[in-house]
Amino acid sequence: HIRGVGPPPELVRQRESKWINIIRQWDHILLKKSSKVRPQCQKGIPASLRAKCWLLLCGASEKMEQNKNLYESLDSQPGLQSWVDIIERDLDRQFPFHEMFQSKDGHGQRGLFRVLKAYTQYQPDEGYCQAQGPVAAVLLMNMPAQEAFWCLVQISEQYLPGYYSPLLEGVLFDAALLTWVLKRTCPAAHKHLQQHGVEPLMFATDWLMCLFTRHLPFNTLLRVWDLFFCYGVSILTNVAVVLVRRVLGRAEQRKRCQGQVETLETLRGVKGQLQEEDDAFIAEVDFLLL
């Protein structure tokens, strides 16, 4: 087994068969995130079953079942022109280097447009928030448009209420919570941020609202989302703490960040400090769950 290529095939098969059993007994388990499911999410959901598992974990399967033809109906309507214009302007900003989203008329950008437009019709009071673009794009990389739509609904309503509303009250709350968790788990980094007048809202708003889509290597991101769909919003704070620790945890790192500007630049460029699939990173996030 070569480091960085992912787990060996026999381990993948073993995990797949465990997940297939969980999926078969889903209604029977129905404590969803029970002791059976959580350890499997921590190990990472096999790529072949990820879409199915995410749908079950977040309750999108159920919602889709209850609202059988709703997505098709929303999809067939033109949508409010003011939202349509904003969404269209944003399409080519999402993963511009990913083959799925490179072309204006490609299935990726078309699918993304349809999912986001449908959401503005489903939630007309809320409409579209730019941070939903990259979230919907990652969902579309893993599943068809209708399933991605219902996952986006569950993320926006059940997992991150108040994140995408005009006042962003959910994000403000979690950024304040991050200050408290940092003070408790990473006092040196917390003190450094305070000394240089760096508030979590200055760097973590984008992290939290975009579910780290722009700030983690892709395979690590998928592992984080496995945990997010299982444990909910608390995972986001844990990931943010681990990221701060990675770039400001050691004295020599803090020494290199002489002021507010340098500190913010380091935090915003955190992706460059991470390896493609970092089991140690996931283990640190898991550890904070205890």
Image (spheres, grey):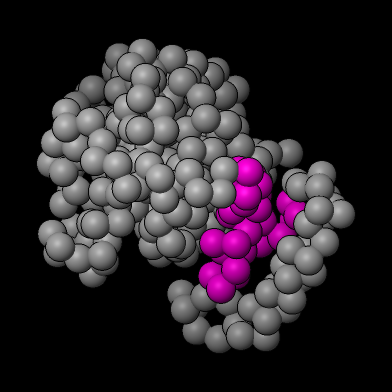
Estimate the x, y position of residue 91 in percent, counting from the top left: 19, 48
Does residue 238 appear in the picture of this structure? no
Q: Is residue 181 something one can see in this rendering?
A: yes
User: Which sits in the foreground, 94 or 244?
Assistant: 94
- Residue lying furthest right: 28
Give the magenta part as a residue range: 37-66
Q: What is the quadrant of the C terminus in the image? A: top right
Quadrant housing residue 195 = top left
Q: Give the residue drawn at x 60%, y 83%.
A: 8
Residue at 74% from the left image edge and 63% from the top image edge:
23
Q: Nearer the viewer, residue 15 or 220?
A: 15
Per the picture, the main secondary structure of the magenta-coloured stretch is helix
- Where 37 falls versus 210 (above or below)? below
Q: Is residue 39 above or below residue 8?
A: above
Q: How many numbered circles are shown?
A: 0
The quarter of the picture where the N terminus appears is: bottom right
Of the pair 30 and 201, the residue shown nearer to us: 30
Horizontal placement of 278 versus 41: left or right?
left
Judge left or right: residue 188 versus residue 165: right
Residue 234: within the magenta?
Answer: no
Residue 204 screen position, x and y as percent: 37, 29
The answer to which of 81 and 21 lies nearer the viewer is 81
Q: Is residue 46 magenta?
A: yes
Q: Which x, y percent locates residue 173?
A: 49, 16
User: 183 above or below 101?
Assistant: above
Q: Which residue sits at x=54%, y=38%?
A: 154
